Image (tube, rainbow, N blue to C red):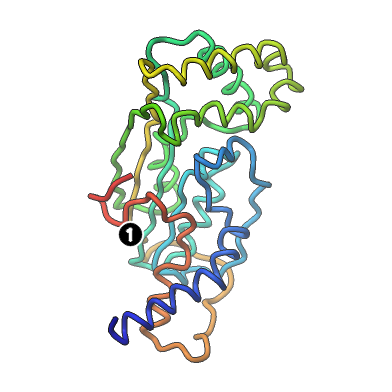
Amino acid sequence: MSPTARRRSGALGEVRRRYSSTINTRLRVDGHLSQARFPGAFPPFTGSGLPRASFDGAHARLVLVTVPKPELIVRELVSLVRPGGWVASFEADFLSHNVDPPSPEYSRLLAAFQAHAQAQGIDTHLGRRTHRLFREAGLTDINVDAVVHVYPLGHSRRPIFRDFINNVRETMIEGGFISREDLERDLRLFDERLADPETIVISHLFFRLWSRASARRQLTGPAPTARRRGWTAADERFLASVVCVGSPVGFPTHPGGGP
């Protein structure tokens, strides 16, 4: 490994140890569907407290679809990036999520789940409108594409909808969106569907967005922090380019990358 590579490897470890916890906790941009943090698993967003226009890049992955008022996170995310820096988003839309052959129990669970999410101000079809949220936050040159998958038997995300239901089952029951008896019956039937190799599970429609921050944005907030002791200007640039990445696993680093 070259001296530069070693230095950058050490820098990445420093970022993960010192900054990732701060970003993930204060900015609330670290989410992942497979963790079943959906919906309403995050407390209300009140701002990150991080210096404006101080990072080369920032992204949110599968977070906006889990919270009310996602525009607050989008505006914060955009405000943290320097002019010319990149902003990226990866968000889900329930449009394509389904099973085949048709499953009445899935349809009943989905109706109750979406009613519960809507009551909390959460948009399960947010993916399709992320481009508007980022445009309203000041981005202009926005690129968008979308991907969808089929989850075969044994895939870790095949039972993801069941996990979502279990994550909020008590609040769904308490809110009157479904009875305990109906929920347990339909979950049992749905599990039988998932175990059937002739059943296919279609993923959410995942929208990928990337853009460059404009120099014309109006920014407010703390000034960028001073250079850290012992770091060169190149180190600072490298740190800034990765410090805002909340959940990089599975997110493309370029438009041609995988989901």
User: Residue at the spot x=55%, y=26% of the render?
Assistant: 162
Q: Quadrant of the C terminus?
A: top left
The picture quadrant where one finds residue 6 is bottom left
- Residue nearest the viewer, comparing 57 with 153: 153
Rate crowding at label 1 as few (under 14), some (14 to 19) or many (20 or more) other CA atoms within 10 Å: many
Taking depth in this image into account, of 68 and 237 the one nearest to the observer is: 237
Residue 196 screen position, x and y as percent: 42, 17
Front residue of this view, candidates 88 and 212? 88
Left or right: residue 42 versus residue 210 is right
Looking at the image, residue 47 lies above or below residue 17: above
**Above or below, 206 relative to 248:** above
- Pick out the residue farthest to the bottom: 230
Q: Quadrant of the N terminus?
A: bottom left
The total of numbered circles placed on residues is 1
Q: Amino acid at mark 1?
A: Arg
| In the rendered image, the vertical position of residue 173 relative to residue 68, given as above or below | above
Q: Is residue 198 left or right of residue 114?
A: left
Residue 169, compared with residue 6, is above or below; it is: above
Residue ID at (30%, 43%): 144
Mark 1 falls on what kind of element? strand
**Residue 172: x percent and y percent?**
69, 23
Residue position marked by numbered label 1 in the rendering = 212
Residue 76 position within the rendered picture, expressed as x and y whole percent measured from the top left: 53, 57
Q: Position of residue 159 (x, y in %)?
A: 49, 28
Which residue is found at the position 62% from the left and 65% from the top?
49
Quadrant in the picture for residue 131:
top left
Q: Residue furthest left?
A: 256
Q: Quadrant of residue 35?
A: top right
Q: Residue at x 55, y 12 (%)?
A: 189
